[in-house]
Image (cartoon, rainbow, N blue to C red):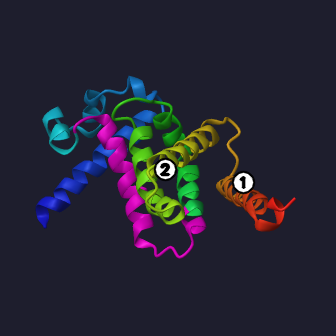
Amino acid sequence: MGFLADSNITKRALAAALKALMETKPFSKITVRDICEVCDINRKSFYYHFKDKYDLVNWIYYTECVTVLKEKDYHVGWDLLEDLCAYFYENRNFYRKTLSVDGQNSFSEYFRDIIVTIISSEMEGIFGRDNALPFYVDFYADAFLCAIKRWLLDKDCMPAEEFSSLLKNCLLRTSDSILQKLSPESTKE
């Protein structure tokens, strides 16, 4: 148990160093060497725990958000959405900088993969084993990622409760409208 505790102490120190550096520097300008200097840890130790700074960002998100959300027993998906938005809002300065970086190994790609995992079973429940299921999952994952990024990157970022309420309202009202248009009564005209 001692090794795991030491490993987590090192990882948390590296995470704190990255967050501190991001208060004054853009993510793209921060190097592994910078992170190690803040912690007084050698680069070899960093690479023992993480493959690069993107992996460190993903670890921060996973430990601070995903593991916490997994502990909760969500009966309603909207509650998960509200908690996720609250986490991003509370940590918006950090995620503004990480979400503005795109490409391979970026947090955006990692977060999108998590969204895909979360919505895949929901989409399968809606569409069944339709051959187009990957398209539907990609569509909603991209839409959600884009909405989150646009929200957090807005200089006048609205509070999490307002944003999650707007998302919920948009999805429910759109769904209701589609259902009304597809109902047997509306197709008789």
Residue at 58 percent of width and 50 percent of height: 89
Of marks 2 and 1, the one in the foreground: 2
Residue 106 place in picture, x, y as percent: 38, 35
Q: Could you tell me which secondary element the residue under label 2 belongs to?
A: helix
Decide if residue 151 is on the left or right side of residue 182.
Answer: left
Which quadrant holds the C terminus?
Answer: bottom right
Q: Is residue 48 magenta?
A: no
Residue at 50 percent of width and 41 percent of height: 95
Q: Residue furthest front?
A: 188
**Magenta segment:** 51-80
Above or below, 185 against 39 in this view is below
For disc 2, the marked residue is 137
Decide if residue 2 is on the left or right side of residue 61.
Answer: left
Q: Could you tell me which secondary element the residue under label 1 belongs to?
A: helix
Residue 20 place in picture, x, y as percent: 41, 39
Residue type highlighted by circle 1? Cys
Circle 2 packing at 10 Å, graded few (<14), some (14-19), many (20+), is many
Residue type highlighted by circle 2? Val
Q: Which mark is residue 170?
A: 1
Above or below, 182 against 71 in this view is above
